[in-house]
Amino acid sequence: MVREEERLLGEAHTNVAFNACIAARRGLSPRIHDLQEFGCNIGMGSDNMAEDMVEVMRTGLFMERVRREDGRQPTPEQAMRWATVNGYRAMGIPDGGSLEQGYKADLIMIDFRRAHLVPRLRVVSTFVHQGQGRDVTDVMVDGQWLMRDGTVLTMDEEATVAEAQLVSESAWARLFVRRPDLKPTPGWQPMSGTAR
């Protein structure tokens, strides 16, 4: 059966952000294969939940396999491409997402010596199926190290996380003041003790 929406998106060469974890939470299953076949560029997104890109790749892989009723398609390599090369294309960066001559010096380094990454028969398959975000030890973007040995170099990570908590508590507290009809869920308590 022809999917008219997917065909129209494909004819327009639309970039699609496959937010697999959000889709799974809502019980949705976008027809990724059809979108690709018609000409869309499939990237991946993590939206506003806690999932990192490793979880997003894995969830996208599983969701699409369930939707297709095919335990082998898409492959882990296809899911990795959605999250790397295709993401660069979606952002209009043609020379990124792959280790090739003339491309930007972007890379991630993964520690495969961890127990959950053994046995390792195919590197990409192992990482997509079994990896965790904390397995990424080093990140370089356009020749600049952003993370080394698990430490973020471009910001004070601890202070940024603490500030994010305070900002979120403040935003929720203001909402509850402006909207007395909304009640905090049981157990909601700002970690800071008082929200700004």
Image (cartoon, rainbow, N blue to C red):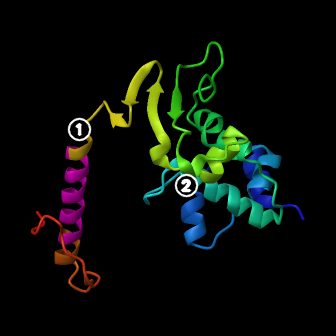
Label 2 sits on residue: 55
Residue 121 magenta = no
- Given residues 138 and 196, the one toward you in this image is 138
Residue segment shown in magenta: 159-173
| Residue 156 image point, x, y percent | 23, 38
Contact, CB < 8 Å: mark 1 with mark 2? no
- Given residues 115 and 22, the one toward you in this image is 115
Residue shown at the point (60%, 67%) measured from the top left: 24
- Given residues 32 and 107, the one toward you in this image is 107
Residue shown at the point (26%, 50%) measured from the top left: 161
Q: Is residue 2 above or below residue 139?
A: below
Q: Secondary structure at mark 1?
A: loop
Q: Is residue 14 visible?
A: no
- Which mark is drawn over residue 196? none
- Which mark is drawn over residue 156? 1
Given the image, on which type of amino acid does mark 2 rest? Glu
Quadrant position of residue 189: bottom left
| Residue 50 image point, x, y percent | 43, 58
